[in-house]
Image (cartoon, rainbow, N blue to C red):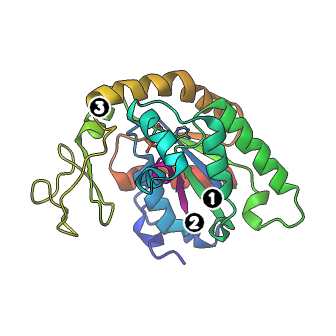
Amino acid sequence: MATAVSTVAGEDGHPMQDLSKMIPGPILLLGAPGVGKGTQAKQLVQLWDIPQISTGDLLRANVKNGTELGKMANEIMQKGQLVPDSLVNEMVALRLTEPDVKRGFILDGFPRTLVQANWLDEKLAKQSSDPADTPASTLPVVAVSIQVDYTQLLRRITGRRNCPVCQTIYNIYLQPPKVDGICDVEGAALVQRSDDTESCFAGRMLTYQSLTAPVVEHYRALSRFAEVNGDQPVADVAASIVSSVERLRA
Ligand code: AMP
């Protein structure tokens, strides 16, 4: 069960109430590349004890393992473009059959197109009318969009470095490791994602504006939507997300 409940402070600075009993249900984290969806998802995973489902991570695992999907996706990802909807939807469908999603899940980086959003809405609507339902699947999706301005995003993306062992995320400008290029926890050499360069970032932002920004509008039009300021310390962003989800689930 969650152990980090009391570590997330509410917006008033006091610890959040024990939310571990709340069934979080399906949660979407939306926002441009670099707004901190992955970082925030990891905070929420600890708090609610539900899995983070990052389509970017799943695709990178496929690339690393040399699967057919990985071979197809690799070149597309290098260009900052989107992997075809049908492939990503299939990958998400498979992930959602795992038992750890019973109380809910945090989708990070999905849906990224209106086709994906409509597919997800339909899939969850079908599940919620299924008599074999789990508690989470009867809950509607809650979408939270994280906002950060372009210049800040550029610094976050081009400065981002990951530990290949423990996956801790650093930023050489904003949150550097104690020793240049080395993970504080594991002592491993940090790596930069190959699509975190300035030229690739520009392509990813164009893709975001044309294909993913309409997804944010899609969920804004439904009533279970919140926007949070992502240009704050990690714990403050997490607290804003938690209070938004709590409000939208009330
Ligand atoms: P991310 O780690 O979320 O920034 O994703 C890295 C890359 O994976 C993206 O630039 C896309 O090429 C691909 N990708 C991740 N999620 C999706 C998605 N939902 N649909 C299509 N492509 C995706």
Of label 3 and label 1, which has the lower sequence position? Answer: 1
| Ligand 1 neighbours mark 3 (CB distance < 8 Å) | no
Amino acid on which disc 3 is placed:
Leu
Q: Residue at x 68, y 43 (%)?
A: 224
Numbered tag placed on residue 4 in the rendering? none
Q: Which residues are magenta?
A: 50-59
Which residue is denoted by mark 1 in the rendering? 95
| C-alpha gap between disc 3 and disc 2 | 30 Å
Q: Residue at x 49, y 23 (%)?
A: 209
Which residue is denoted by mark 2 in the rendering? 50
Q: Position of residue 43 (x, y in %)?
A: 44, 60
For marks 3 and 1, give the one nearer the viewer: 1
Amino acid on which disc 1 is placed:
Arg
Of label 1 and label 2, which has the lower sequence position? Answer: 2
Q: Are marks 3 and 1 in contact (CB under 8 Å)?
A: no
Q: Position of residue 228 (x, y in %)?
A: 48, 41
**Neighbour class for label 2 at 10 Å: few (<14), some, many (≥20)?**
many
| C-alpha gap between disc 3 and disc 1 | 31 Å
Q: Is residue 106 above or below residue 69?
A: below
Q: Tell whether position 183 is magenta.
A: no
Q: Tell whether position 57 is magenta.
A: yes
Q: Is residue 11 above or below residue 116?
A: below
Which residue is denoted by mark 3 in the rendering? 154
Query: Which one is nearer the viewer's eye here, 12 or 84?
Result: 84
Of label 3 and label 2, which has the lower sequence position? Answer: 2
| Numbered label tally | 3
Name the element at disc 2: loop
